DNA sequence: GAACTTTACCGCCATC
DNA sequence: TAGATGGCGGTAAAGT
């Protein structure tokens, strides 16, 4: 059963403006990912803060990497009003974009706009200096180049995407969808992201995909490294998993586990587990009416107090307040029998 | 909120 | 010889 708490339709002024920047040599699939997520989000049209998507470029026409020319409606000044700026990949990423483009990106970032890159779009952000001091990712084939060319960036190659606050970067091509879903999850909750994933016929998240709440990288390739152990941990999140448990599953020492975890995810095992648990708790709070105590138990927190502490530290709110904030977005009743397990 | 215990993390070094 | 792994011990963080 689905109880709809959606409020009345919002006005254009309330919309969150998402502007994609099409650079010469645009990789159109990357732009397509952004369109698919932010321009066609089904079921979200009545929600406050839903997206007003548009594409801009330096000139009216943009040569793409895919053999045709794209005509766009808006010029660069569109970025000045964007709440979120998206830079899809472009084939000429080896060279810095035009100075006007870099300035527009810098100004958008300076006034607090969220900056997102897809694939090698990260190079445009790097050229603008927006990734300095940040953790970032890009297409795996270009990751070494990014790290070499911009030593100030902490480049993490084996992840789907990285959320480093107001700067978010995704890995190659289809990872743009993963990052888009993450942004929707951040803005509208797990329910909306799942709805959008269903519409796009993709998984709501891949292998530990909830891990991206903070800087939450996940491995791109399944069945390599510790991905099996992480998948196992996700299946048993409600247990009190220790470092020794994970090491035993991975058939290695605790020391090696920590080392490999950090190499593959950018996080320590404990921190990764905490993020997973927090994400599950958020999902349960958003999509069920389970008491906070049960949410804590099912997410693997030792107590409701521990869950509240984590919420206060990471989300600066309480579980109850968090749940209340999502009431307007649809609340599903708990599955039969699950509320008291 | 303090004190204590447990667990996790990391640097260093040895071994394979 | 370089790289991966594991053990040890100190420190920090989390839990009680």
Image (cartoon, coloured by chain):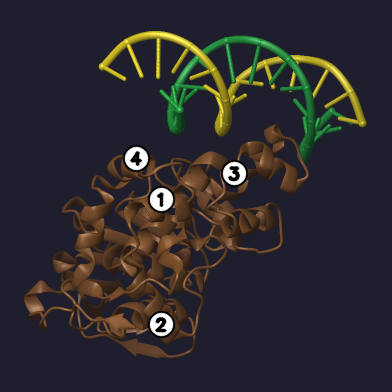
Chain colours: A brown, B yellow, C green
For discs 4 and 2, the disc positioned in front in the rendered view: 4
Q: Chain of mark 3?
A: A
Q: Quadrant of residue A19?
A: bottom left
Q: Residue at x 46, y 81 (%)?
A: A29
Marks 3,1: beta carbons within 8 A:
no
Residue occupied by mark 4: A305
Q: Residues within 10 Å of mark 1 (few under 14, many from 20)?
A: many
For discs 2 and 3, the disc positioned in front in the rendered view: 3
| Residue in the foreground of this view, choosing between A36 and A283 | A283
For discs 3 and 1, the disc positioned in front in the rendered view: 1
Residue occupied by mark 2: A32
Indicate whether C15 appears above or below A302: above
Q: Residue at x 50, y 80 (%)?
A: A202
Disc 4 with disc 2 on a shared chain: yes
CA gap between label 3 and label 1 equals: 15 Å
Q: Position of residue A6 (x, y in %)?
A: 18, 79
Marks 2,1: beta carbons within 8 A:
no
| Residue in the foreground of this view, choosing between A283 and A152 | A283
| Residue in the foreground of this view, choosing between A62 and A86 | A86
Marks 4,1: beta carbons within 8 A:
no
State which tag comes first along the sequence, 2 or 3.
2
State which tag comes first along the sequence, 4 or 2.
2
Q: Position of residue A289 (x, y in %)?
A: 31, 66
State which tag comes first along the sequence, 2 or 1.
2
Q: Chain of mark 4?
A: A
For discs 3 and 4, the disc positioned in front in the rendered view: 4
CA gap between label 3 and label 4 equals: 18 Å
CA gap between label 4 and label 1 equals: 9 Å
């Amino acid at each position: 059963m689905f109880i709809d708490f959606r409020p009345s339709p919002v006005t254009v002024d309330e919309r969150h403006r998402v502007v994609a920047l099409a650079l010469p040599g645009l990789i159109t699939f990357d732009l397509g990912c952004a369109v698919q997520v932010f321009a066609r989000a089904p079921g979200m049209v009545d929600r406050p803060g839903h997206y007003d998507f548009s594409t801009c470029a330096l000139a009216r026409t943009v040569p793409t990497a895919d053999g045709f020319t794209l005509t766009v409606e808006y010029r660069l000044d569109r970025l000045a009003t964007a709440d979120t700026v998206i830079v899809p990949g472009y084939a000429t990423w080896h060279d810095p974009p035009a100075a006007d483009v870099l300035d527009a990106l810098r100004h958008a970032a300076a006034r607090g706009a969220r900056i997102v890159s897809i694939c090698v779009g990260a190079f445009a952000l790097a050229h603008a200096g927006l990734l300095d001091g940040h953790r970032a990712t890009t297409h795996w084939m270009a990751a070494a180049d990014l790290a070499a060319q911009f030593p100030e960036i902490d480049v993490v190659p084996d992840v789907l995407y990285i959320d480093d606050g107001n700067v978010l970067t995704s890995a190659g091509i289809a990872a743009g969808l993963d990052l888009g879903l993450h942004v929707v999850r951040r803005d509208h909750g797990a329910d909306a992201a799942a709805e959008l994933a269903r519409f796009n016929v993709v998984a709501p998240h891949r292998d530990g995909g909830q891990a991206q709440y903070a800087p939450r990288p996940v491995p791109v390739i399944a069945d390599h490294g510790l991905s099996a152990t992480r998948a196992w941990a996700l299946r048993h999140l409600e247990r009190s998993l220790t470092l020794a448990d994970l090491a035993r599953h991975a058939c290695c020492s605790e020391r090696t586990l920590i080392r490999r975890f950090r190499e593959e995810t950018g996080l320590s095992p404990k921190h990764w587990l905490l993020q997973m648990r927090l994400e599950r708790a958020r999902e349960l709070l958003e999509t069920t009416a389970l008491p906070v105590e049960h949410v804590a138990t099912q997410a693997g927190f030792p107590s409701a107090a521990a869950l509240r502490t984590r919420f206060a530290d990471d989300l600066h709110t309480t579980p109850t307040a968090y749940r209340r904030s999502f009431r307007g977005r649809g609340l599903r009743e708990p599955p039969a029998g699950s509320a008291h397990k």
